[in-house]
Image (cartoon, helix red, strand yellow):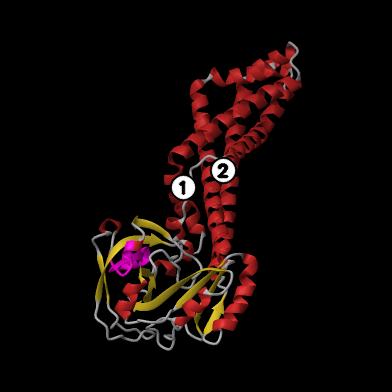
Amino acid sequence: MGMIALGLHNLLRNKLRLVLVAILIGIPFFLLLAMYSIGDAVQRQTAVLTENVNMVLQLRARGSMGHVNMVGQDRILPQGVLQKVRGIEHVEHVEPYLLAMAPITPPNFVMHVGLAPTAVKRLESHGEAGNPRIIAGRDFTVEDAGQDVAIIGQGYAQWAAIKPEDVGKATLTVDPTRTHPVIFAMERPTRELRIVGIYASGYVFGDLQLFLPIDTFRSIYGTDQGISWLFVKVDSVENVPLVAQRLRETVGDVADILAPESAALFTATTSRAVTQLTGAGGLLAIALMVIVVFFVLLMTVRERAREIGTLKAIGASNGGVTAQFLTEALALSLLGGALGLLLFRAVGAIVTGRLFALGIGPFLPSHYKPLFESLTVSNQISASVVLLVLAVAVLAAVIGSAYGVWRAIGLSPIEAMKHE
């Protein structure tokens, strides 16, 4: 116990160095926690998406994409399908959507999606993904039904020169008469929609959409009856095959029934890429801690060679010297870990997103870049995070001090005196 106490006492022999070393170790700990937070956020997003996908089936008109103004793809489901689907056992709820295309340059076109104000905001090409994060303004409320309001994706907003500070005042003109090689004109009057929110989805094309109340959509595009997409939420994963069979029997003659997986696969791919990169970042942070501890302990052994020799001359064992230096290394690592935890708790949520974009972004394909703004990271310090810090502190202390301890116990009293 005496050598352990001596190791703790040695920390205070040079207070300036103690502070500097704690900062040098604390910064890699902060980076480690940031990598952990990013990986955890991506995993949670993937888990939620996969769970929802497993219980969702999509219906659309047979052989058609279901966009009301898309050349050759404008057939939609009959309105009566909605009531038939609602009557099927084990169907928890259904959500109808109407879709139209609008040309912009660049890229080519965007999607206008009509939905009930409380429905999931589903993304074109990733239809099962939904409820992207509102980054400015507000979400829909039940009072928005039938109103001339909309929520716009950040990519579409950028094209329309709508900034976050403009939300609530800015408007977007919907013009059904505009055409494109894959879009036919509809002789309908233009309509101005007030933008009440901007969202970020994490998908490039997903951010090129405009959500508006479904009754407003029907009024703009003259679609009094019919449904582009119908998403069917089943009450449990086990009942999905049964409901799919009942859907084929009930409405299969007019509908294609899909179990969409594209967003799950996309997110799983993103998750793997980000997990690999955050793992590499975490290992780099641990390596930095080990290097700091290594050089601090090596310098300490050099400074205290005479002291070590004296301790061994008066009977200190190699085990005692080892305990002293391991205690000092572990205390330094824990102090740096505590500093990293405090720093992460204070600014982690603000800084981590930028670290994601700057540190991991260059290594990801360009179509993952919108994920930087849609990913929600947490700065909460859970028991698992504390255990992670403790484990890494012990690892850094043991590895970083190994060479210094070996040098220390290898010194004989006579060699130590000569060294001085």
Q: Using the numbered discs, state the Cα–Cα distance from disc 2 to disc 1 in whole angstroms.
A: 15 Å
Label 1: which residue?
Answer: 352
Comparing labels 2 and 1, the label whose residue is closer to the camera: 1
Is residue 153 within the magenta segment? yes
Looking at the picture, how far across and down is residue 259, in whole percent?
57, 73
Residue 105 in sight here: no
The quarter holding residue 234 reads bottom right
Task: Between residue 374 and residue 415, name the one nearer to us.
Answer: 374
Residue 102 lies, with reference to residue 130, above or below; the image says below
Quadrant, the C terminus: top right
Looking at the picture, how far across and down is residue 140, in whole percent?
35, 61
Say left or right for 37 vs 223: right
Amino acid at circle 2 = Ala
Looking at the picture, how far across and down is residue 162, in whole percent?
28, 63
Query: Which is more N-terminal, label 1 or label 2?
Result: 2
* Helix, strand or loop at mark 1: helix
Residues rendered magenta in the picture: 143-161
Say left or right for 411 vs 189: right
Task: Between residue 152 and residue 86, name the one nearer to us.
Answer: 86
Quadrant, the N terminus: top right
* Residue lying at the far top of the rendered structure: 314
Amino acid at circle 1 = Thr
Residue 285 tag number: 2
**At 31% across and 73% down in the image, what residue appears?**
216
Is residue 383 within the magenta segment? no
Say left or right for 276 vs 203: right
* Helix, strand or loop at mark 2: helix
Residue 85 in sight here: yes
Counting every numbered tag in the picture gives 2
Residue 303 lies, with reference to residue 401, above or below; the image says above
**At 54% across and 19% down in the image, what residue appears?**
12
